[in-house]
Amino acid sequence: MRPGDSLVVQALRSYRGEPLSGSHSYPVVRDLPDPAPRNRVGRALTPVRAVVRSFRRRRLARLADVVHVETITYEVDAFTLPRLARSVPTVVMVHDVEPHAQRLPHAVHSWLSRRVYRSTAHFVVYHRVLAEELVTRYGMVRERVHVAPIPTSPQPRETRVPDAECPTVLLFGSLRANKGIDDFLRALPLLTEPSLRVVVAGGGEREIESRLRAHQAMDPRLELELGQVDDHRKWELFESASCVVLPYTSFHSQSGVLADAYSASRPLVVTDVGAIGPTVRDDQTGEVVPPSDPAALAAAIDKVLRAGVPAYADRLAAAVVRHEPRAVGAVLREVYETAARGRSTS
């Protein structure tokens, strides 16, 4: 924010039936309908709620110089975003070039995505490889695709060096089919570290949770914390970790878990998919292996554990500086000004 700027945030009134509130230093207009009411958890936004959301967003947007849309709802925005972007300079975050889990047939989602991406809005992704994917897959205008680093979340306490005598491998986050859980389990017997803890924390698909429980019965090194993990416990897990593993089999996004690992100053072992592999390779904050290769995954984990957390500390610290919120904010500010200038000269 600069002198003379003002910020208004439009947000949900409730989420899954729970009212949302909180104190902020800026006005928050809580008038958007809950996309997933309690009796429809996991389903798409209903048509009535979609129309209400669109109307209220457009009504507030008329007062703005620039609109920042944080989350795309393709079923709705395919029809409303082009009109919004024609009326006010609009910047849209693209968290996932392709969704993690398809709610719609692929052909339908592709058609909706093209309508969104071919609007006159400007779009922001978290790595240049995602920008290139948008351009090549959807024919987007390069000048309307911008790259910002994914912001790191501030850790609430000072990071400590984990126990070198009993290193801990952490796999954290939602448990989905593309997360490479089975590859990770096949890699565990190949690890050579004699004293080792392996922690899998998060919730997700029941079949994956069942396979993890079955493997835990055979491998005493494996510890499971299945279900939702609050922020306090999340930072405890990262603080105890010697490395964080992201063994995705496919991905068209950037990872929030990667940003958490950076905040906790923990090296990573990741597969070369989406923006995860290129980010770790660029920042030299861990090891990158091909997807669906348990042997390579195990060798990389062994390598990081042998090196130890301090070996990566300087590179992780440098990466955090590039990913801190103020650095991301500076990039977004430039995008806002570019969008506004484009409208003023058109």
Image: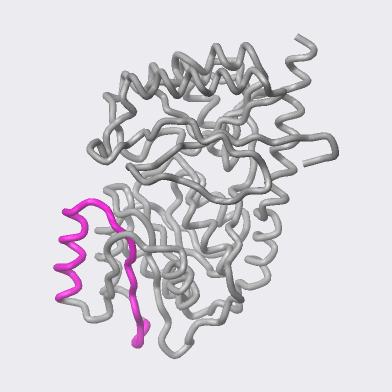
Q: Quadrant of residue 207?
A: bottom left
Which of 190 and 344 lies nearest the eye of the viewer?
Answer: 344
Quarter of the image containing the N terminus?
top right
Q: Residue at x 34, y 49 (%)?
A: 249
Relative side of 34 to 262, left or right: left
Quarter of the image containing the C terminus?
top right
Is residue 306 placed above or below 7 in the rendered structure?
below
Residue 303 seen from this side: no
Q: Residue at x 32, y 36 (%)?
A: 36
Is residue 49 placed above or below 249 in the rendered structure?
above
Q: Which residue is drawn at 49% across and 50% down?
A: 276
Residue 142 seen from this side: yes
Q: Residue at x 61, y 76 (%)?
A: 158
Instruction: Report x, y in % for residue 95.
Output: 49, 38
Which of 10 and 282 lies nearest the eye of the viewer?
Answer: 10
Instruction: Report x, y in % for residue 145.
Output: 62, 28
Query: Which residue of the protein is positioned furthest toward the right in this rendering?
Result: 3
Query: Which residue of the protein is positioned furthest toward the bottom in this rendering?
Result: 165
Whether residue 184 is in magenta: the answer is: no
Is residue 249 placed above or below 198 in the rendered structure?
above
Q: Identify the magenta region.
A: 193-217
Tell me which colouring the rendered structure shows. Answer: one colour
Whether residue 206 is in magenta: the answer is: yes
In this rendering, the count of numbered labels is 0
Q: Quadrant of residue 17?
A: top left
Relative side of 225 to 345, left or right: left
Instruction: Report x, y in % for residue 19.
Output: 41, 44
